[in-house]
Amino acid sequence: MSELVTGEAVALELRPAKLPSRGLAVLLDLAAAVTVYVVVTLGLVAATASLDEAARTAVSIATFVLVLVGGPILVETLTHGRSLGKLACGLRVVRDDGGPIRFRHALVRGLLGVIEILMTFGVVACVASLVSARGRRLGDVFAGTLVVRERVPAGQGGFVPPPPPWLVGRFSGLDLSAVPDGLWLAVRQYLTRMRQLDPRVGSSMAERLAADVAGCTGAPVPPGVPPAMFLAAVLHERQTREAQRAFGGPAAPGAPLAPAGAGVPVLPPPAHAPAGVSPMVPPATTQAAGNPVPGGGASAGRPATGFVPPA
């Protein structure tokens, strides 16, 4: 996973493509380019049969440059980094900031690709990709681009485990506004991958993240609460508040959210209702004894119409 920051200060999670998938995409692109080159060459041989040897050589060189060099540059420019081979392998060329590439990026990649792929049979490109931390060849380094994976296996979806029931709603009074978005992203990534980590590494990471969240909220981690459960409960509280702000529906503090694909659960009444207020208040029909509410019942000499004027 490679985290890039765009010009709008938005952190992007990009998965750099590995050497096998990139090599397969290059082979597919070369096969398509060579097929087009052979077809065009056969047509030009028949069309230039009456020319002399120098003219036919110039035409063949121009055909080679236009098809095997200009063709990939044009395709990557028009498709914003998705050539035929990359489209088949689920890859895409993007800028260092995560944006789509333009003509100058494709031009630099294409010109250097002639040297490190065509002239050296891909040896220079393979060595550069193995040395680079993000698998970039020389064309990517000079062009400021990166080949990333667009398709992610379904089994790697980010499922955040819910907190235990006895922690739901316990942190409803915390002030979460001071927690930065980068820390929330780190907490979410940890919770989605904590089962894949080594137990000791995961434990130390959870303690460090819990300490950072507690420092931002101003409230320490409650004694006896494991750091991973604390992070899950705090993240659940944040998601609950965001859902309430988005949909505007009042809900009980700390009420669990319905999982994706499940029915809407019946929320229990608040555990501690304010004094003198019942959780279930029936609609009142009188304001006070002897003072009927307009529309609440039959007034003196007039039948009820069911219309209630606005307050």
Image: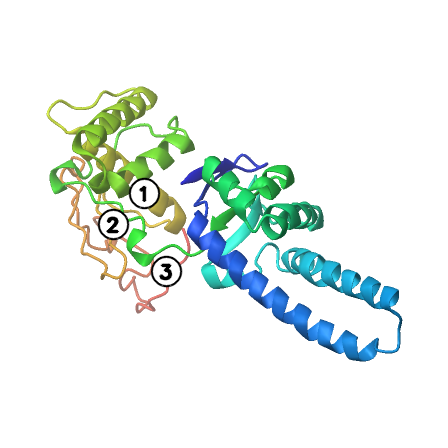
Three-letter code, disc 1: Gln
Towards the viewer: 71 or 266 = 71
- Name the N-terminal-most of marks 1 and 3: 1
In the drawing, what numbered circle is on residue 27?
none
Q: Residues within 10 Å of mark 3 (few under 14, many from 20)?
A: few
The image position of residue 82, as x and y in percent, is: 57, 58
In the drawing, what numbered circle is on residue 239?
1
Three-letter code, disc 2: Leu
Observer able to see residue 250: yes
In the drawing, what numbered circle is on residue 308?
3
- Name the N-terminal-most of marks 3 and 2: 2
Image side of residue 104 versus residue 239, left or right:
right
- Name the N-terminal-most of marks 1 and 2: 1
The image position of residue 249, as x and y in percent, is: 33, 50
Under tag 1, what secondary structure? helix
Q: Residues within 10 Å of mark 1 (few under 14, many from 20)?
A: some
Q: Are marks 3 and 2 in contact (CB under 8 Å)?
A: no
* Quadrant for the N terminus in the image: top left
Towards the viewer: 79 or 69 = 69
Mark 1 to mark 2: distance in Å? Answer: 8 Å
- The residue positioned 56% from the left and 51% from the top of the image is 121
